[in-house]
Amino acid sequence: MEKSVGGVQEHGAVGSAASLIELRGMTKRYAGVLALDSIDFQINPGEVVGLLGDNGAGKSTLIKILSGVVEPSSGKFLHMGKEVKIRSRRDSYELGMETIYQDIALVDQMDIMRNIFLGREETGFLGFMKMKSMKEKAMRVLEHTVGISGITSPDQIVKGLSGGQKQAVALARAVYFKNKILLLDEPTSALSVRETEKTLEYILQLKTEGMSSVLVTHNMYHGYNTCDRFVVLSHGKKIMDVTKDQTSIEELTEVIMAN
Amino acid sequence: MRELFARLRSYKAGNIIIVFAVVQITCVVASLLFPREFAYTDTSSIQTLLKSLSPIAIVSVGVGILMIAGEFDLSVGSNFAFTAYIMALIYQCNYSEWVAVAAALALGGFIGLLNGLITLKAKIPSFIATLGALMFWRGMLQIISGGRTESMAPGGFFENIFAGNIGPIQAQFIWAIAIAAMGYLLLERHRLGNHIFGVGGNVESAKAIGVSPNTVKMACFIIVGVLAALAGVISTARVYSVSPDQGRGYELQAIAACVIGGVSLTGGSGSVLGIFLGTALLFTIQSVLLLLRAPGFYLDMFMGILIVVAVIFNRLTKKDKG
């Protein structure tokens, strides 16, 4: 939040040097199988990109490459037009990306504050944690960003939260750590309809604050309403890359079904 | 009253606090009613209780921390005896008692490190790796000792700090309290503690956020090793000698204490207060049975029942918490 991204840009900047992250010729081979075949992909500031495609199209592989979990066989990363390497989660994180998984990556037995700060604790003398400061910050980020009811204190144990509340905490964590790009891999697949709506609303709210997102989804209707641009993958190839005003939900559905 | 209960239950160690308090109150009341038959509140019986629970409490804190991280150490009893015996041998070779103590603690840490390396590098369950270590170090001790008890009584500051008294309270018990306090600070206030809960609770989440499970677990293995050795040092200072059979069964007593204290067998939850009270409860029951002059095997039976009941109880109370 303190290191907020610059002004929200209208799209049309696709492919220009203004891309936050750009992938060129990204290829991934798994033991003979071509999971990604020379993909070009950009994420622009303040943009929600829908990453669509059938099972096995390569969506998750692309997200894993962006989050540093999987190393590509070949291809280039550019950050604001400059070539960079993403070899680990840390590299990805330092470029401002945070991944939100479908199987919500929180530790059930821990409280909200400890989850938010897990692995990134504020510490002082000898590595002891600054509990008071972390609690205050967790409280603030919960109040400010998590509009989902039922979360009243950072001391609540995560186990007792609903799927939507957990996803909200995961999002709050990404927001707190000032990430510029959210990589959302089927973030709503474990959520109820109501919670799904809330989560998508939240992604849009974050967009107005300058956050970019990549949303992997099966549900075309969610995708269509939330995203500004659509990238369709099929068998590891990019078969479509269009802004919302250039397409319709029918066309997108057709393209995905046809391949 | 109901509010107090609800508040207690909301603590991590809530269940054990309630059970422990009930047992203590019952014992105290019984000893006031029958001072002659049941001398529970006698200074000497309290002192015996505190003395005997201290080494196991120290071991349990280590074992519990490792269990929260999701691993077991069954070798603590062998580690306890082996390192203490080596300490006594070094002392017998005319080295200073402090060199001997330092060597014992380092050796304990090394045994923990080895347990960690074998478990994490060979990717086998720590239950098996440390079961092997339990037998290996005990066997090694039998060879080195030839079955002989080794003595070590340097007296002086060594005896004062490990086995002396501060007022009516023995040094062993103060050590146990100090180790528990350090364990609490580590788990609840230190970054490593946060990582321990994270790794034990959901290893994939911890990894995804950049916490290395192997580093965290290795640290815990070493901590347990050092604490087992420290307990050995303290025990030796109390009885002036080490027998090669010392510490047998400590691993199971420590795990029992942790489980009674609410540490999850699958990792991710538990508290130092629970571990400490779990140990204290085990030894309270031992002390009660001794006061009632029950034969020793009653103790085993009671402990057996207590462990099973504790796990069932924890499961049931977790269920209604959702």
Image: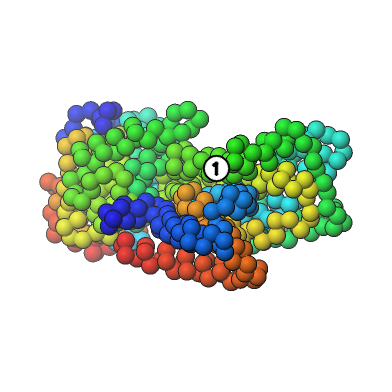
Q: Is residue B213 left or right of residue A36?
A: right
Residue shown at 14% from the left, 59% from the top = A250
Residue shown at 33% from the left, 32% from the top = A133
* SS class, disc 1: helix
Residue shown at 16% from the left, 54% from the top = A197
Amino acid type, mark 1: Ile
Q: Position of residue B54 (x, y in %)?
A: 61, 49
Q: Position of residue B87 (x, y in %)?
A: 78, 43
Report which residue position mark 1 lands on. Answer: B177
Res B279 quadrant in image? bottom right
Q: Give the color scheme: rainbow, by chain, secondary structure or one colour.
A: rainbow
Q: How many marks?
A: 1
Q: Quadrant of the N terminus of chain B?
A: bottom left
Q: Position of residue B108 (x, y in %)?
A: 69, 45
Q: Chain of mark 1?
A: B
Q: Residues within 10 Å of mark 1 (few under 14, many from 20)?
A: some
Q: Is residue B48 visible?
A: yes
Q: Is residue A179 left or right of residue B24?
A: left
Q: Quadrant of the C terminus of chain B?
A: bottom left
Res A259 quadrant in image? bottom left
Residue shown at 44% from the left, 69% from the top = B312
Q: Nearer the viewer, residue A185 or B309?
A: B309
Q: Is residue A36 visible?
A: no
Q: Classify B106 as above or below B10.
A: above
Q: Position of residue B42 (x, y in %)?
A: 57, 52
Q: Nearer the viewer, residue B313 or A110?
A: B313
